[in-house]
Amino acid sequence: MKGPTMKLASVALLALALGGCQGGEGNQSAANAANGAEPRSPDGRRYLSQPLVKDIYTADPSAHVWNGKIYVYPSHDIDGPTPEDDLGAHFEMRDYRILSMDKIGGPVTVGPVALDVKDVPWADKQMWAPDAAKKGDTYYLYFPAKDKQGAFRIGVATSKDPMGPFKAQPQPIKGSFSIDPAVFTDTDGQSYMYFGGIWGGQLQRNLSGKYDPNGSKTDLGQDDKPAIAPRVAKMSGDMLEFAETPREIQIVDDKGKPLLGGDHDRRFFEASWMHKYNGKYYFSYSTGDTHYLVYAIGDSPYGPFTYKGRILEPVEGWTTHHSIVEWGGKWWLFYADSQLSGQTRLRNVKVTELHYNPDGTIKTIDPFVK
Ligand code: FUB
């Protein structure tokens, strides 16, 4: 690994941990830290867990366990001049920094810059939520960014070290579009990329397979029609391309009917994640403007997936984005909120344990303690 790494001594991880904060003006949490009180949300609630790191702002945590260690691939939030809008122009991230830890609850290492937008020939700006995969002795970083025409594409970069630095391929993945790649490797070794996001994520501008800069800003605008579907594509053997044209993922209700565009509490918005539990495929995602993390279960990596319920109630801040991994015989939800700054554009990643019911459904988590 090149460059400096920071060992963060004062990392607070789970519900019992208390800690100081930095950031946003008028933030109740920061004010509490200054007077030594337990951090609380602006409306006075206690947080379920504490930020994994406080020296940089991080969001959209994609966690993986490799060689017994936990690696988290987050967005690296930065403050910028662009005013907040509905399409996420204020998320102006320019690089990635990777987190690692030997155990959940232990110190977190913040890696140096693993990939900078200036080193990605095709990318212009907005390095949004990434994911990573491992095949053989190579690590793959998958990332969305806007190209020079303002269209989101998905790129891939490789490294022999899970912390980077990563070297980007000169072009985005052929046939890729929109945001939030999540790469899942099934038990037979085959990998799949799940991706997409509506509104600022531009999925609704790619319905024909070609980016339409004049397409809808939000969604189909048809509440009684099936919602826009996230996409999945099998990855090629070298993990650098799609092995097939991306397919739509059907998310259906308990009667087998597709969720509708007007069903904002349940329909797909962004933040795909896939994990397998007891032989079933769990596709989870964010509902965006209603701020839930929810999930649907299927029998194949392609779906269809039947909506089952909520994983996480709304956090502080507009966005919600997560990953789910097994480590140490337990399951963990990595997520993010805006505790440190009080601003949606400057988020911090967290982790908490996730529990299943005996029937395989997930127990809903409240990010605040009663
Ligand atoms: O972090 C930028 C964008 O916000 C992500 O790509 C979305 O999932 C949302 O968290």
Image: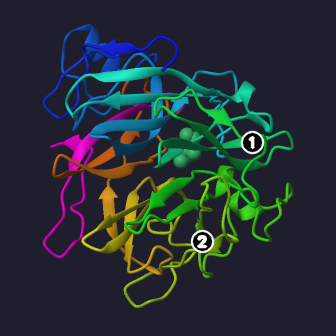
The quadrant the C terminus occupies is top left
| Circle 2 SS class | loop
Residue 150 sits in quarter: top right
Residue 327: x, y in percent? 23, 47
From the viewer's perspective, tell me whether residue 205 is left or right of residue 166: right
Which stretch is magenta?
345-370
Residue 271: x, y in percent? 50, 53
From the image, tell me which residue sits under label 1: 146
Decide which of 38, 13 is in the foreground and name it. 13
The amino acid on which the numbered mark 2 sits, given as a three-letter code, is Ala
Does the segment drawn in magenta span residue 363? yes
Scheme of image coloration: rainbow
Distance (Cα) linking label 1 and label 2: 21 Å
Q: Considering only order in the chain, which callout, 2 or 1, is on the residue closer to the N terminus?
A: 1
> Residue placed at 53% from the left, 78% from the top?
250
From the viewer's perspective, tell me whether residue 253 is left or right of residue 237: left
Q: Is residue 198 above or below residue 319?
A: below
Numbered badge on residue 229: 2
Numbered badge on residue 79: none
The amino acid on which the numbered mark 1 sits, given as a three-letter code, is Lys
From the viewer's perspective, tell me whether residue 122 is left or right of residue 240: right
Give the quadrant of ligand 1.
Answer: top right
Residue 315 appears in the rendering: no
Decide which of 329, 238 is in the foreground and name it. 238
Residue 265: x, y in percent? 44, 65
Q: Is residue 286 above or below residue 267?
A: above
> Residue placed at 57% from the left, 26% from the top?
165
User: Chief secondary structure of the magenta span?
Assistant: loop
From the viewer's perspective, tell me whether residue 213 is left or right of residue 252: right
